[in-house]
Image (cartoon, rainbow, N blue to C red):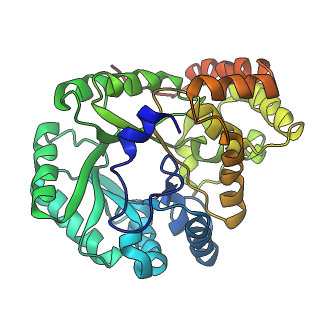
Amino acid sequence: MHGLRLKKISHLRPLSGPPPGYPWLWLGTWSMGGVGYGRADIRLSRKSIGLALEKGIRHFDTAGFYAKGQSERLLMAELSPVRKEVFISTKGGLVWEGNRVFHRARPEELKEQLLASLDRLGTDYVDLFQLHWPDPDVPVKESISALEDMKRSGLVRFWGAGNLKARQILEHFRPGSLVPLQTPFNPCRMASQDILKAGHHGSRTINCIVSPFEQGLLTDPKFIGRPPGKKDIRRKNPLFLCQNLKRPLGQFFHWILDHDISAAAFLLLWLLCLREVDIVIPGPRTPGQVEEVFQHVKWLDGTGLLERDLHDILEEEFGHDIFILLDELGEESALCPGTRYPSK
């Protein structure tokens, strides 16, 4: 793996056990709890966590907000026997009140949410606790101060944040601080690269990519002709309803059928070609999807995960046209009605 990237993220490791074999790959659990993504088989979700653990994943990302706490309970059920050998990150700042979602990121609210997460996870500490989203009614500095207090108390080993704008990163994170920062990024969200660059400016952040597959839009061709159901949270994502994307998405999936690689694996490799990407957090919800994610690993053998070498290998193997197609996906996504991109 690229020496600089590995050096940046190597301290984000479990308390015990050997060094993680895939420190750049974390398992996300947003869709596993059965809320917002249609019907979910909890047994398959548990098997997916177990398979990821068996294959060498040691970093698991969740939030109290995910599935109203059910995703944290799933991790407790599977990971309690190996607690100190895994790295668990969770988040606060978003809460459910009935079926409505609210920002709640005052210091006392974040502390209350952390304690609730510890209870659901069945642990007395979390490795990483993050501000899920900034609260428009609370200064970001105030929320960050609360996270720092949690770390000093020993309840949290590291603190981080998510969904910040570039200017907020430059304002609140000191050079060299290497704060874990979660940002949605994929070929449909190329505008977010400005956020990643701001974080890398002066080594302010460790960039953790969430939604690398745009909630399944980039890995499941069924969404080209059939948008998510009315009770599916993805229906609120304008990209799923955007007619502009039908043609480039169709071309992408046709290309995938002609090559010996899954869409998930190729997209992970594409992300790892980018110098601004440190960690990627896909959210497979079945064992089959876990297997698809792991297909990318064989392509890293011998590259040392040098971004330029990996890009050259992919271009030599698959041709330059696929990179042009991904750029086109980004351009068309920016034109989709209702799409909002983060400002600087």
Quadrant location of the C terminus in the rendered image: top left
Q: Position of residue 185 (x, y in %)?
A: 50, 34
Q: Is residue 321 at least partly visible in the picture?
A: yes
Q: Residue furthest right?
A: 258
Q: Which residue: 49% across, 61% down? A: 29
Q: Is residue 329 at least partly visible in the picture?
A: no
Q: Which residue: 86% across, 38% down? A: 259
Q: Position of residue 253 (x, y in %)?
A: 80, 37
Q: Position of residue 313 (x, y in %)?
A: 72, 27
Q: Quadrant of residue 289?
A: bottom right
Q: Which residue: 65% across, 29% down? A: 310
Q: Is residue 140 left or right of residue 69?
A: left
Q: Position of residue 216 (x, y in %)?
A: 64, 47
- Out of 142 and 76, give the one closest to the viewer: 76
Q: Quadrant of residue 80?
A: bottom left
Q: Is residue 290 left or right of residue 2?
A: right
Q: Which residue: 44% across, 41% down? A: 6
Where 228 falls versus 67 (above or below)?
A: above
